[in-house]
Image (tube, rainbow, N blue to C red):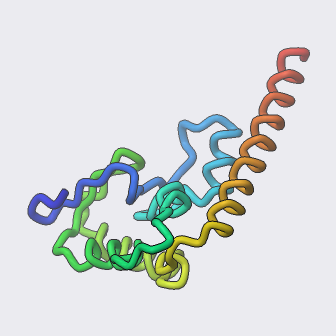
Amino acid sequence: ILRGDLLIACDAIQNITTTEGCNFMGGMVSRFFGFIRPMNVGPGIVTNNVRPADYTGPTMWDDLQAIDKLGWRNFISAHGEVVSDGSAHETFTNTLNEVWGPKKLNSRYDPMAAAVGSLKSKVLLVFFITVAAGVLYYMRRA
């Protein structure tokens, strides 16, 4: 939603710059999956950007470029800190180009890549849950 020079987003764009307030595992998982980055496209949004095989419309890169072209400078999101110093748009443009770029966000639906990405996420999630359970188990025993 654009209100004057303020972009209001929910999950697609996030401004998480610290793990303060996270427990140890939450901080590790957030860093591992790439959530800790100013004015970032939510990694979950990118992972779940599955479009039908016959889709010929705009790519995620096209959608984000359209947001980038809007005249906004400040930012509020459901995830992360508010940016009210006028630097949000410039930071978003830099993150969009440096971290994601058209190569990663311009692809059409690839069922094999989606399956592998989904499997990788599930394996990593099970790994982190197992580690967290082990840490909690040993902490309770101490």
Q: Residue at 38%, 59% (x, y): give it.
A: 13
Task: Please give left or right for residue 137 compared with residue 115 in the image.
Answer: right
Question: What is the quadrant of residue 62 in the picture?
Answer: bottom left
User: Where residue 31 sits: x, y (%)?
Assistant: 64, 55
Question: Residue 53, relative to residue 9: is it above or below?
Answer: below
Farthest residue to the front: give it.
54
Residue 48 in sight: yes
Q: Residue at 71%, 62% (x, y): give it.
A: 116
User: Where residue 105 sits: x, y (%)?
Assistant: 48, 76
Question: What is the quadrant of residue 114 in the picture?
Answer: bottom right
Question: What is the quadrant of residue 133 in the picture?
Answer: top right
Task: Please give left or right for residue 36 compared with residue 125 in the image.
Answer: left
Farthest residue to the left: give it.
4
Task: Please give left or right for residue 31 compared with residue 20 in the image.
Answer: right
Q: Residue at 59%, 72% (x, y): give it.
A: 110
User: Where residue 104 sits: x, y (%)?
Assistant: 54, 78
Residue 36 in sight: no
Q: Residue at 34%, 77% (x, y): give it.
A: 58
In this view, the residue in front, 7 or 49, is 49
Q: Quadrant of the C terminus?
A: top right
In this view, the residue in front, 41 or 23, is 41
User: Where residue 5 sits: x, y (%)?
Assistant: 14, 65
Q: Quadrant of the N terminus?
A: bottom left
